[in-house]
Amino acid sequence: MDTILIVDDNHAICQALGLMLELNDYRVLTCHSPEDALGLLATQDVDLVIQDMNFTRDTTSGEEGKQLFYALRERQGDLPIILMTAWTQLETAVELVKAGAADYMGKPWDDAKVLNSITNLIALYKLSRANHRLERVNHQRQVAIADADLCGIVFGSGAMQRCIDLALQLARSDVSVLITGPNGAGKDKLADILHANSPLKNKPFIKVNVGALPMDLLEAELFGAEAGAFTGATKARIGRFEAADGGTLFLDEIGNLPLSGQVKLLRVLQTGEFERLGSHKTQKVKVRVISATNADLAQDIAEGRFREDLFYRLNVIELALSPLNQRTDDILPLVQHFIGSEFSLSKPALQALLHHRWPGNVRELENACKRAVLLAQSHVLTEADFGLAPVVSVVRATSHISAASEPRRFDQRQSDPQPVYVPSSIPANATFSDDSACNLATSTNEVIEVSREDIEAALKQHHGVIARVAKALGLSRQALYRRMDKFGLDKS
């Protein structure tokens, strides 16, 4: 409930205003002198002040009100203040409004006007305070990032910002972190950030791609092997856990670890103990484990491919990384980073980059940028340089219109985009989600070409219902009427 402070030496005024405000669900505080008002403000949270301009009998100069106003403004600079007086002076009103007074009203007041002003002022006050809080949070975030080692990561999206913020927070602890996300999205970069900003940053940081290890060498790679433990083992070798002792071990593609390896991994995570292959001597290490996977481990657990107890050991906290097509604000900063300052983008190239689904994520984008730089015929890169199809600006409607007809969209299984309805005049800074190109086209009606036969077929199919015909053709009703006029078709 919003709180309003009424400051007036007239008790009847305080009672009348207070009753009106309480009936409109406001909490009301009243006092009768500037001194009491300042004391109350020091102990109570107030959302708005309504103050009189004169507090001494037979005084009409407004000087007391001015002094109170400036004192309130000094203590809480953004607090909305409504000045109310029976002796309105234009010069004083102008002065105080310029100094930040929210409103200046005469007595007797209009209830509706007062309530409307209060509603608007409190809404603006809350919005202003929320903005200030957000600015403080952003400033603190920028300070934290400025002091952090981001390991060269490039981003521009809020989603990536939040992920990095969480990674920096987790870096200070020694808990196990599971990084999830699709291949090529940047999971290894997050692992780098976790280690580089941790107390273990000067200790070993060992990376191992579990999915790339041969099944018969998996145990030897992770835990080491004695000489003669297997064919070709001519000397003892240490494993990745032993090499990472005192530091961090990054297990990438942990979802590909076979069940036999999961049992041994669970033991070392629980106790820090293991034996080299071919040895009975138990060794002990202290290692922080960061793991990553593109698999749905919950589904793997349900299907018996991954141990649930191991999952909870690895997943003390999860860092979930979104695919690149869900953080399109990262695309242009990444492109600029990959192509360098020597090259720029044509407008069609910009549209194609933002519109492509990037199933290979950042890795695919980096490869496309390398291709563009190598094949470029000028310093302005085109969509062809990136190996992308141009975004189609106009698609002619067919004569076989049905209610189910829709513009074709990207097939998530394909890397090349399918033609979609997109207007040719897209702003240079436009970004698109999966459906935005289709929506943008249907709201920009003039880019869709339809023939007389298209309209006649649609009218017949939808029994002349204009709303359905327009929807089937991808037009607004006004655009459909214009075309019917053009072709001389009956609109009745």
Image (spheres, helix red, strand yellow):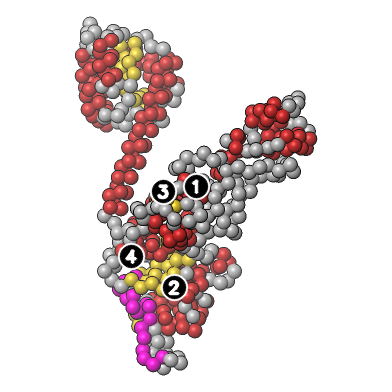
Which circle, 3 or 1, is nearer the viewer? 1
Residue 49's disc number: none
Nearer to us in this view, 400 or 158: 400
Is residue 227 positioned above or below 121 on the image?
A: below
Residue 195's disc number: 4
Q: Which residues are magenta?
A: 233-248
Q: Is residue 60 magenta?
A: no
| Whole-percent x, y for residue 360 in the image | 50, 61
* Residue kind at label 3, given as amino acid type: Gly
- Binning the other alpha carbons within 10 Å of mark 3 as few (below 14), some (14 to 19) or many (20 upward) gives few
Q: Quadrant of the N terminus?
A: top left
Which circle, 1 or 2, is nearer the viewer? 1
Measure how far apart labels 3 and 2 are at the Cα level: 29 Å
Mark 4 in CB contact with mark 3 (< 8 angstroms): no
Is residue 259 positioned above or below 430 on the image?
A: below
Residue 209's disc number: 2
- Binning the other alpha carbons within 10 Å of mark 1 as few (below 14), some (14 to 19) or many (20 upward) gives many
Mark 3 in CB contact with mark 2 (< 8 angstroms): no
Nearer to us in this view, 393 or 158: 393
